[in-house]
Image (cartoon, rainbow, N blue to C red):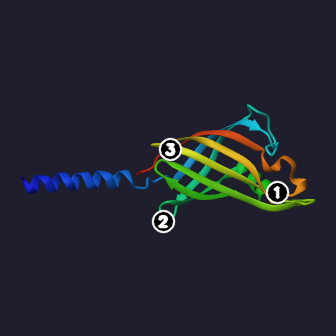
Amino acid sequence: MNRPLTLVALATFLVSCDSENAIPNVSGTYSLNLKVTKLDCAMLPAAVGDESTGVQVVVTQDATDKKKLTAVVQGAAGVLLTLGLGSASFAGTVSGNTFDVLLEGRAKTEGTCAYSQNARLRATLDKDFLSGTLSYSYATNKGSDCGTKDTCVDEQSVTGARAATTH
């Protein structure tokens, strides 16, 4: 048995396994296109089929834990999110080539219903191209005045690209 050759093969295998578990660089500025696909909650001031283009989102990975990231919506879309939900900043994680970020809106009440309006972006990255879903829903205390807030969801399909990066 040729030990040097066996050790080289084992080392190559271990490196390839480690690269499969590597956390990709998803940081960058993305230009997104959004299309309303579902309006169960009527949180969005839009109609099914309405589109928004050129929405800028800056994604930053944590310096010490590359699995953690933030996504901040810029421009007019960021202002609208801040007015509606109280923030334009999402926080979440990346796993493989997918990321999942949540914007937890400000707390509100209506009668016995305590709730927040939330937005969640789940997306897959293929090199510099992104696709996924931006969902808007309520987190409630299940109070009797919550009605359909417990089950409704508004959705937008998301596509876009990251500005040129060195990664």
Instruction: Tell which of 159 and 52 is nearer to you.
Output: 159
Q: Are marks 1 and 3 in contact (CB under 8 Å)?
A: no
Instruction: Tell which of 33 and 106 is nearer to you.
Output: 106
* Residue drawn at x 55%, y 59% as measured from the top left: 69
Which type of secondary structure does the marked residue at label 1 adopt?
Answer: loop
Is 57 positioned to the left or the right of 14 in the image?
A: right
Name the residue tied to disc 3.
Answer: 125
Task: Give the mark nearer the N terminus: 1 vs 2.
Answer: 2
Whole-percent x and y of residue 46?
A: 80, 38
* Residue drawn at x 54%, y 58% as measured from the top left: 60
Q: Are marks 1 and 2 in contact (CB under 8 Å)?
A: no
Measured Cα–Cα span from mark 3 to mark 2 = 19 Å
| Residue 27 appears in the figure | no
Name the residue tied to disc 1.
Answer: 142
Whole-percent x and y of residue 161?
A: 54, 41
* Residue placed furthest toward the bottom: 64
Q: Give the residue type that dot 3 points to.
A: Leu
Instruction: Tell which of 61 and 42 is nearer to you.
Output: 42
**Could you say which quadrant of the image residue 153 lies in?**
top right
Q: Alpha-carbon neighbours of circle 1 within 10 Å: few (<14), some, or many (≥20)?
A: some
Which type of secondary structure does the marked residue at label 3 adopt?
Answer: strand
Q: Give the residue type that dot 2 points to.
A: Asp
* Residue drawn at x 27%, y 55% as measured from the top left: 14
Which type of secondary structure does the marked residue at label 2 adopt?
Answer: loop
Q: Alpha-carbon neighbours of circle 3 within 10 Å: few (<14), some, or many (≥20)?
A: some
Whole-percent x and y of residue 81?
A: 74, 53
Of marks 1 and 2, the one in the foreground? 1
Name the residue tied to disc 2.
Answer: 65
